[in-house]
Image (cartoon, rainbow, N blue to C red):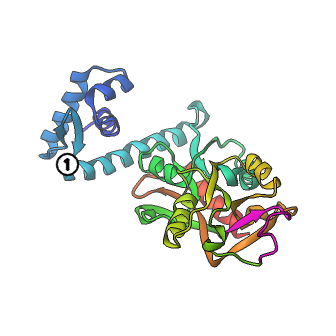
Amino acid sequence: MTLNQLKYFCETCRCHSITAAANQLFVTQPAISLAIRELEAEFGITLFTRFNNRLTLTEDGALFYKKADYILQYCKDMQFELNGSRIQQNPIHVGIPPVLSSFFFPGLIDAYRSNYPDALVSLEEYGSVRACDLVQENKLDLALVNMEMYNIDQLDSHVLIHDQLVFCVSPEHPLADHTSITAADLDHQDVILFNKDSVQNAILRTRFDSANVQPNIVMQGNQLYTMINFIRSGTVGCFLYSCITAGLPKYKAIPMNPPMKTDIGIVWKKGRYLTTQMQNFITFVKKYYDA
């Protein structure tokens, strides 16, 4: 078994195709096919099944992939640590919720860089659903997400913030004098939701359906500035995290009854090798929000 064989195999897993993997790695298809056959012969297992020109991992193949990916990540991290500055450090890729990013993450990243001035972090905005998928696919190293997801147990995670969703309106809104609202209060009201790749969107739609309520969804977005401009009109309300509305004193944040509690946390792929950079970032973020 060689590292090249593992690299060819792992890229084929991600692409579900020998042709696509060869294109990604700039090698020939026979080289990748040979590497896979040699691994199968060495370990006495079948790694893939083929259906409609798409490769799918067998049960043995899925287990082998987890271990192979771990080995490759470990070797990459070891190479950097032993060679120090002679090797260009790769950034860690962190997914962040768009609506939260403008309030929380500039301060977090500034503090992290103060502690680790040589660290490279690439922030990428995604809703929680999409971010978790990308973490599973190794396209993101880490993500900060809404934890109220049905499959959150498929990832390793740590809760950072306990919060709730509130209905944010201007003082002129018809519901502005309410101390709390129910789903029924929003029937036929103009409402803004986060994008469809957010957990918030799914949670709210489930509550609306359960109450047989049909709000008028005027927009689904992730740009806080745009949402606030809609709220300013006086007829539109938007669901936001209460931690965000604390920075919007001109507007009224109305909790739901019953409350819509939610946790925000950091997630990473189960069984993945955590580089030193990833470990440092996770540890720092935990301490930052516990402070």
Number of other residues with Cα within 10 Å of mark 1, as a class: few under 14, some 14 to 19, many 20 or more: some
Q: From this view, report whether residue 208 is shown above or below residue 28.
A: below
Residue in view at x 36 percent, y 20 percent = 26
Where the C terminus falls, by quadrant? bottom right
Place of residue 259 in the rendered image (x, y in percent of width and height, measured from the top left): 63, 77
Visible residue check, residue 275 = no
Q: Residue furthest front?
A: 188
Inspect the magenta stretch and tell me whether residue 272 lies in it: no
Q: What amino acid is at disc 1?
A: Thr
Taking 148 as reference, is 197 above or below it? above
Nearest the viewer among 227 and 100 is 227
Residue name at image x 43 percent, y 52 percent:
273
Q: Which contiguous range is marked in magenta?
A: 163-178
The answer to which image quadrant residue 154 occupies is bottom left
| Residue at (62% x, 57% y) in the render | 216
In the image, is residue 23 above or below residue 93? above
Image quadrant containing the N terminus: top left
**x%, y% of residue 151?**
42, 63
Left or right of 158, for residue 9: left
Most foreground residue, 220 or 261 = 220
Say what secondary structure mark 1 lies in: loop
Q: Is residue 198 left or right of residue 233?
A: left
257 or 80, which lies in front? 257
- Residue at 26% x, 53% y is 63
Please name whichever residue, 41 or 185, is drawn nearer the observer in this view of the structure. Answer: 185
Left or right of residue 180: residue 2? left
Question: Which residue position holds label 1?
Answer: 58
Q: Farthest residue toward the right?
A: 250
